[in-house]
């Protein structure tokens, strides 16, 4: 399980006295625990952990943008390191070509005929890619495909 792997890596980072890595993993573990407490669950499945990781990555990307505007390259570099660390726990993302074929298939399956059907197509695509594609990219490709109809 992904949650167990994160816990194991945290313990290894603590033993190695890698403060930056252990702090990032500790925060990630805390966010996972918070979701479990809020949802009243004993443990999260891998899909739930992936949702937490993606949310943390998004927050860090927003922080990097703000740090770069404020000329704080040191803090931006720390956030980039944490993003790279967290991305190691995500499944490998689909290539754009693979994603385009999934989008094309979803358009056919849903019977979409215009951009008004975008929600249905996106729902089908997300079910098929489950955490292996960026939501914004999915949305852009679906819009592009439906606009061409």
Image: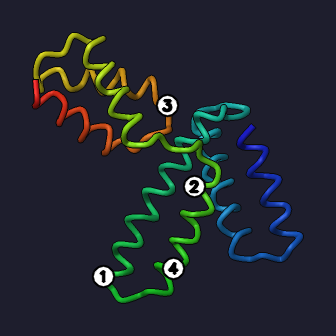
- Quarter holding the N terminus is top right
How many residues crowd mark 3 within 10 Å: few (<14), some (14–19), many (20+)?
some
Residue at 35 percent of width and 28 percent of height: 101
x and y percentages locating residue 138 in the rendered image: 32, 38
C-alpha gap between disc 2 and disc 1: 24 Å
Mark 3 / mark 2, whichever is N-terminal: 2
Residue at 54 percent of width and 63 percent of height: 83
Q: Secondary structure at mark 2?
A: helix
Q: Which residue is mark 2?
A: 87
Asked if the residue at tag 2 contacts the one at tag 3, i.e. Cβ–Cβ closer than 8 Å, the answer is: no
Mark 2 or mark 1, whichever is nearer to me = 2
How many residues crowd mark 4 within 10 Å: few (<14), some (14–19), many (20+)?
some
Q: Secondary structure at mark 3?
A: loop
Q: In screen coordinates, is 106 left or right of 42? A: left
C-alpha gap between disc 3 and disc 2: 15 Å
- Quarter holding the C terminus is top left
x and y percentages locating residue 108 in the rendered image: 26, 14
Mark 2 / mark 1, whichever is N-terminal: 1
C-alpha gap between disc 4 and disc 2: 15 Å
Residue 130: image tag? 3
Mark 3 / mark 4, whichever is N-terminal: 4
| In the depicted structure, whether residue 34 falls above or below residue 145 | below
The answer to which of 48 and 112 lies nearer the viewer is 112
Residue at 80 percent of width and 67 percent of height: 13
The answer to which of 37 and 86 lies nearer the viewer is 86
Q: Secondary structure at mark 4?
A: helix
Asked if the residue at tag 2 contacts the one at tag 4, i.e. Cβ–Cβ closer than 8 Å, the answer is: no
Q: Which residue is mark 4?
A: 77
Q: Which residue is mark 1?
A: 69
x and y percentages locating residue 98 in the rendered image: 41, 34
How many residues crowd mark 2 within 10 Å: few (<14), some (14–19), many (20+)?
some
Task: Tell me which corner region of the image, top left, top right, bottom left or bottom right, holds residue 148.
Answer: top left
């Amino acid at each position: 399980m992904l949650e167990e792997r994160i816990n194991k890596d945290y313990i290894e980072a603590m033993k190695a006295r890698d403060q930056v890595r252990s702090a990032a993993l500790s925060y990630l573990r805390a966010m996972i625990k918070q979701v479990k407490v809020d949802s009243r669950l004993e443990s999260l499945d891998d899909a739930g952990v992936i949702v937490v990781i993606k949310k943390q990555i998004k927050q860090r990307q927003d922080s990097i943008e703000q740090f770069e505007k404020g000329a704080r390259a040191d803090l931006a570099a720390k956030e980039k390191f944490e993003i790279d660390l967290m991305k190691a726990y995500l499944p490998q993302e689909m290539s754009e070509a693979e994603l385009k074929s999934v989008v094309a298939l979803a358009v056919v399956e849903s019977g979409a005929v215009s951009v008004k059907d975008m929600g249905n197509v996106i729902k089908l695509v997300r079910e098929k890619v489950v955490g292996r594609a960026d939501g914004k990219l999915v949305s852009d490709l679906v819009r592009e495909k439906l606009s061409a109809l």
